Amino acid sequence: MTRPGQASGPTADAGRAGVLHRWAGTAVPLALLVLLAVLPYVWLPLPGLLSGRINSPGSMQLLALMLVFGGIALSYDVLFGRAGLLSFGHALFVTAGSYTTAMALRHLDVGLLTAVGLAVLVGVVLPVVVGAVALRVTGIAFAMVTLAFAQAGSILVLRNPGGVTGGEEGLPLTRDRVPDLLTGVANAPYRYWLALAFLAATWAAVTWLGRSRAGHAWAAVRENEDRLAVLGVSTYRAKLLAVAVGGFFGTLGGVVHLLVVGGSTPHITTSEFTLGLLVMVVLGGAGSKWGAVIGGMLYTYLDNRLLQLASSDVVRGLPDWLRVPLSEPLFILGSLFVLVVFFAPGGLVGLARGRRRAAPEVDGEH
């Protein structure tokens, strides 16, 4: 029997469904976080998926790298999937985090916390400066301006001014300035937990912002910026906040990437790196946290495993028509990307939900 003032019928059902949806939206990620946190204690082998036991150093290193790229892809999705900003310059922020930390450790003779503090400062200032300039234009012009910033950063790193960036050789991590727990093969689980903490922090921040007024503004900008401007809302500030947030977490991702791989490499400065992030997000599902993370982790896993497969004796013994394409991981990843775009416009997450949409979706948070 329905009490006075208590909703009933479709309204009550919708309310209960909303509560259940919010509860699942919190409980599932927490359960998965706990599961991932205990993986370094799991001795089980996964033949065909990992080259050794789950908690072997090689597997931990690969899983840590997958988590890092899951978080970086999530930071890129703040711009592309949520605010609808096609940026070709996200590599600049990752580069800033990695190289600022590496250069501070090597050339300023400071400890890890101070070096990370400098990287955080750069991660706050740089995206705001880049966004303030690039957002003066829209559409493809915005993409070109961000690409120009990233290319300038890449050239600066490769020119190696004063010998501080290492040029094409990159900059190895100064290990005597880093706690022992984060260096060495045997300590791979600690780097794995560091990468997991980065992904969890990025996920929590994106979730909180996505449910805030900022998240609503990003969705409105993505869907119809002109309508939002007519209502008197500053679309420039909403977009600048998206660039600042995405750039900040991209910079943090650069710091964690440095510690996981043990150095800064020029590859992360290239436009190819940003295009890889774009593929990760589209592959998993733009505008979805699960999509960005799954896309980033799956792309990184395939990139590494296909590279090992390409150099294996099994592939070498195949006929040319099969050996040549299997020897090129980028060819296989590109083919997978084309198939997803054609047959699952909503990405792998959209495919799993049984919905095929051409437009991005935002987790049902808005």
Image (spheres, grey):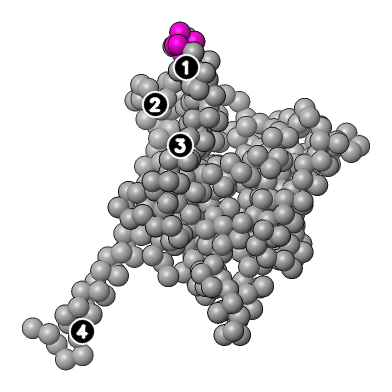
The answer to whether the residue labelled 1 contacts the one labelled 4, judged by CB atoms less than 8 Å apart, is no
Label 2, secondary structure: give it.
loop
Looking at the magenta stretch, what is its main secondary structure?
Answer: loop
* Residue sticking out furthest to the left: 1
Which range of residues does the magenta coloring cover?
A: 315-319
Q: Is residue 308 left or right of residue 135?
A: left
| Of 337 and 308, the residue lying toward us | 337
The mark total stands at 4
Residue at 20% across, 74% down: 13
Instruction: Judge depth for marks 1 and 2 and give the one in front.
Output: 1
Q: For residue 322, what is the image quadrant?
A: top left
Rate crowding at label 3 as few (under 14), some (14 to 19) or many (20 or more) other CA atoms within 10 Å. Answer: some
Q: Amino acid at mark 4?
A: Ala
Residue position marked by numbered label 3 in the rendering: 336
**Mark found first going from the N terminus, 3 or 2:** 2
Label 4, secondary structure: give it.
loop
The answer to whether the residue labelled 4 contacts the one labelled 3, judged by CB atoms less than 8 Å apart, is no
Residue position marked by numbered label 1 in the rendering: 321
**Mark found first going from the N terminus, 4 or 3:** 4
